[in-house]
Image: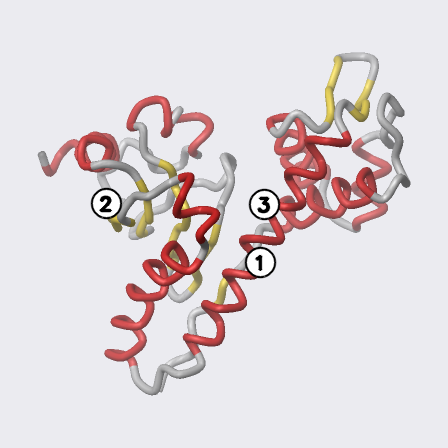
Amino acid sequence: MGKDPRIVKPVYHQIAVDIAAKIVNGRYKEGERLHGRSTLASQYNVSPETIRKAVFLLQDMGIVEVAQGVGIHIESVQKAVEFIDKFRSIESLTDINQKILTLVSDVNEKNAQLAETVRTLLEYSDRYSSINPFTPFELPVGEQSPLLGKNASETNFWHNTGATIIAIKKGEEILLSPGPYTTFEPNDIVVIVGDEESYHRAQQFISPEQN
């Protein structure tokens, strides 16, 4: 039997969640200036690029504001609360996914169970079902895809397709809620939710050479 697929949270996403949690807990106050990127990089023992991605994610969520020459300021405690709530919901669903994966006994069962897992995750959460009642689709990223080397933010994926990326399979790894800065690579499997029209637009967007 092969190894169970591992669900991995990007380091920058983990750092963003940690900073948001500190804002919610009152360690950082609204309007307060956050440490500079170099200080944060040293604090979390990561590269400045990782911190840059974490800060951009927090900025996209409306939690912080970044101004040239001024630095990083805490913009909204409420947005930090909403971000943490969403993260906890996804983490809870991830736990369910891991329990399901432990039941898999061989490769064929893994593949079948893995496909079922994504459906189970969506069906399990009434919260997400009421907000986004769509069927998940899997779309491969071919070696000729124009998305290669780019990320969802650079390609304006949602604006161009109307579909939302909920996971990316990278070999035996499953990247849940990958965020806008995860790079598309050859043989990735992009898992999206959206209506039928969004699915066809996403299919054309990812692999125009096959259409």
Q: In screen coordinates, is 71 left or right of 2?
A: right
Q: Mark 1 or mark 2, which has the lower sequence index?
A: 1
Closer to the camera, 79 or 176? 79
Q: Quadrant of the N terminus?
A: bottom left
Secondary element at image label 2: loop
Residue 86 tag number: 3
Secondary element at image label 1: helix
Return the x and y of residue 133 as percentages of the image width and height.
Answer: 33, 43
Q: Residue at x 75, y 47 (%)?
A: 18
Q: CA distance from mark 3 to mark 1?
A: 9 Å
Q: In screen coordinates, is 55 left or right of 86?
A: right
Pointer 2: what residue? 142
Is the C-beta separation of discs 3 and 1 under 8 Å?
Answer: no
Residue 91 tag number: 1
Residue type, label 3 = Lys
Q: Residues within 10 Å of mark 2 (few under 14, many from 20)?
A: some
Return the x and y of residue 149 as percentages of the image width and height.
Answer: 40, 36
Residue 19 tag number: none
Return the x and y of residue 162 as percentages of the image width and height.
Answer: 31, 28
As drawn, which residue projects farthest toward the left?
211
Q: Mark 2 or mark 3, which has the lower sequence index?
A: 3
Up-down: is 176 above or below 193? Answer: below
Is the C-beta separation of discs 2 and 3 under 8 Å?
Answer: no
Q: CA distance from mark 2 to mark 3?
A: 31 Å
Q: CA distance from mark 1 to mark 2?
A: 30 Å
Residue type, label 1 = Glu
Question: Which of the colour schemes (rainbow, by chain, secondary structure, one colour) is used?
Answer: secondary structure
Q: Residue at x 39, y 47 (%)?
A: 129
